[in-house]
Amino acid sequence: MNAPAYNFAYLDEQTKRMIRRAILKAIAIPGYQVPFASREMPMPYGWGTGGVQVTAAILGPQDVLKVIDQGSDDTTNAISIRKFFAKTAGVATTTATEDATVIQTRHRIPETALHENQVLVYQVPIPEPLRFLEPRETETRRMHALAEYGLMHVKLYEDIARFGHIATAYAYPVKVNARYVMDPSPTPKFDNPKMDNCPALQLFGAGREKRIYAIPPYTQVVSLDFEDHPFEPYRFNAPCALCAAENSYLDEIVTDDKGGCMFVCSDTDFCEGRQAAGHHGSLSAAPYKEKAQEKSNG
Amino acid sequence: MADQNALEHDEPLLVAKSLSKSYGRIAACRDVSFSLYPGEVLAIVGESGSGKSTLLQLLSGQLAASGGHVSYQMRDGVTRDLATLGEAERRFLFRTDWGFVHQDPAQGLRMAVSAGANVGERLMAVGWNHYGRIRDTASDWLTRVEIDVARIDDAPRTYSGGMRQRLQIARNLVTEPRLVFMDEPTGGLDVSVQARLLDLLRSLVAELNLAVIIVTHDLAVARLLSHRVMVMKGGRVIETGLTDQVLDDPREPYTQLLVSSILPP
């Protein structure tokens, strides 16, 4: 182990047991928010303290860890969490979705389909889907207990009344296993269909709010909607400028101060994989790279 | 009219039997019994601190009674003791078969969401899932309570006091309840707005055959709306009877005082 001063994966064993108990309960009651004794982590709230604790509790020495932030493997948050576990647990890390056994994510679900031997750990800022409609925690708990979810539709109604369509684009509420309404963390609603009947286990950790919830493998997850305004995933109407993918979630990247922009896959691993397989978009650097290579060779 | 109704429906809608509530040594409500029939409007009058609001909370199951019980005839015709209802059943009753109009509309409305959603909330809570239909019903109800349909997407924050109160009434009546509790619905409104609201309430009550329990300290409201009046003092019901009878020919000294304290028009 690289850092003998720490216990394996930073947290002490009793804490991990406590978190595992909460995780087991969360899996037993899909979509239900289980309170747990969230610890101080060596990072600020909002940087994924909940996700990190869940990951620390489930990580074993054989695991291969992938960390993504907004789909990207190489942003500050993703890199520092990956380094954190490489240092405190000595586990192997990867950026390839297929090779990972544990994927900690912020705001995205990978484009590559997940399989049964994987666990997806979400970092959650606000676990309560009813929070901005009903500020009292005692009341929202009661509403969950009695499955009173009319209020959730009030939010969607407001969207349609104001914008003509359901304008909620991320943290789009879902109903898990036909019982609990759940906040899927601020993933774009494009990713909601991926949660439904997913072979991988999905765990959600909210550090500041001290809640853990879960979607067990192969569980029904339905996005809430109206009969006459059905749920629709949103995607920019463009191919990826680097890999020409037509079915991936895109980020808009501003390229100059004259209104220019490009759309690229937010999932960097997926995009790089496609480019390596020979797919090139309109702004791909590949032809230039090849030319540069030829020149240096010639 | 009350007696006619009583003959038509021999089963009372709501029965209170020797209800009492004490907060420590203070008895806020003592030994109150009465029956309310479908379509009947009962006014509870009395000065501040006489136990009116406590009684209303006991009747609507928001407060557990220290003694006695309240039973209610559910929509399926079975009369049940409110204390035996589970919380889920009680809350379901509260948003379908009952309405509760607060004195302060801010308590009964969601001030930050649009009027349409305020009216539609109860419908969505009982499983309506069609935006168009919810909106149609909401605009229909706004018309019925004389709110301009063009304002359906405005939040009640932007409404005047009288409009807020009318919106609160629409929000409560949208599921066609059979019983509505009202706690000083005209309090805090100026006189002309009060008159318009009372007029509206009176026509809605007649049209929908609503049973209403209305708490008020304003005898004029009681006279305009109610069939029957209960006068409370110190937590007890000291006089009860038909509205005209109680207000025109009060028997108890306290009621006489109450009636005579109204300025002659």
Image (cartoon, coloured by chain):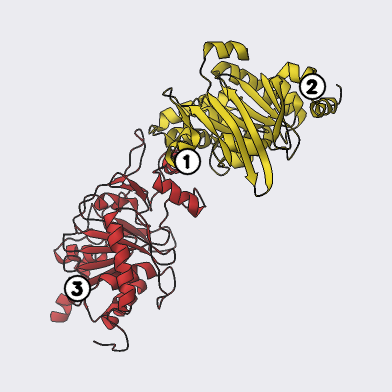
Chain colours: A red, B yellow
Label 3 crowd (10 A; few <14 / some 14-19 / many >=20): some
Amino acid marked by disc 1: Glu
C-alpha separation, residue under disc 2 versus residue under disc 1: 54 Å
What number is the disc on residue B84?
none
Quadrant in the rendering for residue A124? bottom left
Give x and y (percent) for residue B155: 57, 40
Name the front one of labels 3 and 2. 2
Report the residue at 53% width, 42% height from top.
Answer: B113
Residue with the mark numbered 3: A63
Residue with the mark numbered 2: B251
Amino acid marked by disc 3: Asp
Task: In the rendered view, tell whether residue B187 sits above or below residue A104.
Answer: above
Residue with the mark numbered 1: A158
C-alpha separation, residue under disc 3 versus residue under disc 2: 86 Å
Task: In the rendered view, tell whether residue A64 sits above or below residue B143.
Answer: below
Quarter in which the N terminus of chain B is drawn: top right
Pick the front one: A67 or B247: B247
